[in-house]
Image (cartoon, helix red, strand yellow):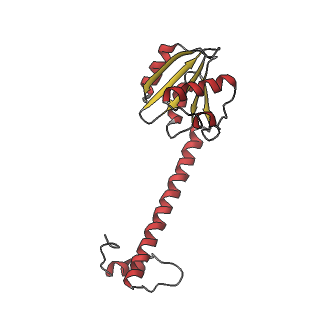
Amino acid sequence: MFVGMDVHKNYLQIAVLDEHGKVVNNSRVDNSLSKIAKFFDRLDISKSSKIVMESSGMWYNIYECLSKRHLDVRLSNPAKTRAIASAKIKTDKLDAVKLADLLRGGYIAECYIPSRRKMELRELVRHRAALVRMRIKLKNKIHSIMLMKGTSISYDGTHTFTKSYIEKLKELDDYRIHG
């Protein structure tokens, strides 16, 4: 059997095809690990079956849930899976069937699936980078407010936002800066 899963935030559309490409099941399942597990238990899928889902923000927990059941789960690269994107008629049911059919034909462009540890490290780096971007944006906003007001604060010439610089900012008594 070949299983294609169109993953969304609140639900999955899961299509099951036999070896000949006939649709055996095409169901909508709530995106909760317990309901996904129940669906696959009821389906009684064999270990030789293959499962594919597109890479999205919610794939990893689903992948882990199914992998723990010793199922062959693949991750499709959505940018390279052009058959779905270029389809004239797009519905979740058709997308799930198309994924399963591409898997059956061996036409899935697979993504690398890192370990849980690597995923956590990557997320930590992404989170830190986002915080740094936010910090820079806030500092730039403070500088632009000061320029708009025609205010400048002398500093040591190398670094702004030192303790003494921040104290001088507080003295400006501007609600946009000191809030």
Is residue 81 visible in the rendered structure shown here? no
| Quadrant of the frame with the N terminus | top right
The residue lying toward the viewer, choosing from 117 and 146, is 146
Q: Residue at x 56, y 24 (%)?
A: 97
Is residue 53 visible in the rendered structure shown here? yes
- Residue 152 place in picture, x, y as percent: 42, 85
- Residue 65 place in picture, x, y as percent: 51, 27
Q: Residue at x 41, y 33 (%)?
A: 10
Depicted 27 relative to depicted 132: above or below: above
Left or right side of 94 for 74: right
**Residue 46: quadrant of the picture:** top right
Q: Residue at x 68, y 24 (%)?
A: 105
Depicted 76 relative to depicted 147: above or below: above
**Residue 70: quadrant of the picture:** top right
Left or right side of 38 for 78: right
- Residue 19 place in picture, x, y as percent: 64, 14
Q: How many marks?
A: 0
Q: Residue furthest front?
A: 88
| Quadrant of the frame with the C terminus | bottom left
Q: Residue at x 53, y 35 (%)?
A: 60
The residue lying toward the viewer, choosing from 1 and 36, is 1
- Residue 37 place in picture, x, y as percent: 47, 22
